Image: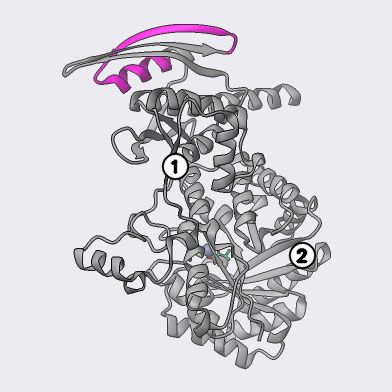
Amino acid sequence: MKDQVIIFDTTLRDGEQALSASLTVKEKLQIAYALERLGVDVIEAGFPVSSPGDFESVQTIAKHIKHSRICALARAVEKDIDVAAESLKVAEAFRIHTFISTSTVHVQDKLRRSYDDVIEMGIAAVKRARKYTDDVEFSCEDAGRTPIDNLCRMVEAAIKAGANTINIPDTVGYTLPSEFGGIISQLFDRVPNIDKAVISVHCHDDLGMSVANSMAAIQAGARQVEGTINGLGERAGNCALEEIAMIIKTRQSLLGVHTNIKHNEIHRTSKMVSQLCNMPIQANKAIVGGNAFSHSSGIHQDGMLKNKNTYEIMTPNSIGLKNQALNLTSRSGRAAVKSHMDTLGYTEHEYDLDKLYADFLKLADRKGQVFDYDLEALMHFANLRDEDDFFKINYLSVQSGSVMATTSIKLQCGAEEKCEAAVGNGPVDALYQCIYRLTGYEIVLDKFDLTAKGEGEDGLGQADIIANYKGRKYHGTGLATDIVEASGQALIHVINSIHRADQIATIKQQNSQ
Ligand code: KIV
Ligand code: ZN
């Protein structure tokens, strides 16, 4: 049996579909670059038939990513498969992933078909996908709850039709590790052509067993694991790929398998995904949580000082976690900033050095010392902004006390600079009133979060908002030493995205007249 476990990342599809505001094409491409660098074998970039935005993202990623295979999802219907192929054809080689439900409850109550019909639809879908590519994956949705005889029939038929990867999802995270491993073993025992395909697993975390179930499947012979960074995904999420990669590395002698993952990219990729998806990571999360490598109790600290093996089964360095050193100030030049970015492992196509350096200088003037984590936060933030942003805060002044707050602002609105002042219940309220008046946009906020980035009281403040405008959700983020300014930037970020979407809609309308 082959000893490589293929890592299939679906952060941009299963993960993204669970976010409260969808990612932009630019953000998805940024994540795809990080996944490529992490060494994932397959990137599921989206579900192209679901929206024009998803189509464009898959196409863009397929055009730019060269070292990971790009895959797109399609239901077992002709149109989905054709649209998936159309979005992927810019890539030299690609995978189409088609699926249909196989559990009794899904077949009877969701699809309202007979099981024979479902098998026919699966076969037809695989054959259609094979017209476009010889890399076809077929999934039996809700396989975890599918009667084993039915599952064996479907798998055999899909392989015969030309699928070379068969994915067995535990779609609702229902099975136990021994049970799920048993399903995989039975497929190996009972499906006559099983050796013609790679067996993949895709486990959800509803009962907190997605990683354990995936590992049981690997031990039973599965050689592809699907999952997401930080375990993002529908409901309780998907199997966390960073956990799979580190389990396989840490327990390699027992498991006898390996992956292509570059483990020292894990920390950075996880941080980037968390930031762009606006999904903070719980401190005690395995591998990438803030406390995953910190030792609190006196007994543990004593043991660590004597011998790290007492309480450390993997090193922080192995996932790319470096000691955060301070070394940049406002006297540091562009070359120093670039060299820091090199050391942190970022290549220049991932950020704009001019933009980053300008932001760095502003921050260094205010803060004195700029830390590695500040630089990373600035980079992610700069990447979210566009050169052609219509609105920009030029000046902001806030006076707040225990009763009311007053804010005055100068806002760049295209070529014109406009001024406004307002009184509010607090400084953010006053500022938002100014921005609403100057831009003409009145927005309903679904969520407003403030978090500290970095350590100590001079850490940066990050504001994240989810706004609802005409039924569509937008995510805005702002980063500054001042939390009122960060809140203003977050709102301006959202308003620029809405303004851009309005402009595109107007152009489309004019073209159609
Ligand atoms: O959870 C699931 O079953 C899926 C399939 C589309 C693979 O996401
Ligand atoms: Zn899923």
Between 325 and 157, which is closer to the camera in this rendering? 325
Callout 2 amino acid: Ala
Does the magenta-highlighted stretch encompass residue 359? no
Residue denoted by label 1: 373
Residue 107 in picture, x, y percent from top left: 55, 72
Query: What are the residue bounds of the magenta stretch?
Result: 414-436
> Residue 389 placed where, x, y %?
58, 22
Q: Would residue 325 appear left or right of 404 to someone viewing this image?
A: right
State the count of labels: 2
Q: Nearer the viewer, residue 505 or 392?
A: 392
Q: Amino acid at mark 1?
A: Tyr
Q: Position of residue 78 (x, y in %)?
A: 74, 60
Residue located 73% across and 74% down the image: 163
- As drawn, the label of residue 204 is none
Residue 269 falls left or right of residue 49: left
How many residues crowd mark 1 within 10 Å: few (<14), some (14–19), many (20+)? some
Q: Looking at this view, name the residue that lies furthest to the front.
A: 306
Q: Toward which corner of the image does residue 399 lie, by quadrant?
A: top left
In this figure, which residue is indicated by the disc labeled 2?
129
Q: Position of residue 447 (x, y in %)?
A: 36, 37
Residue 137 in the image: above or below residue 453: below
Does 427 lie within the magenta span? yes
Q: Mark 1 vs ligand 2: CB under 8 Å?
A: no
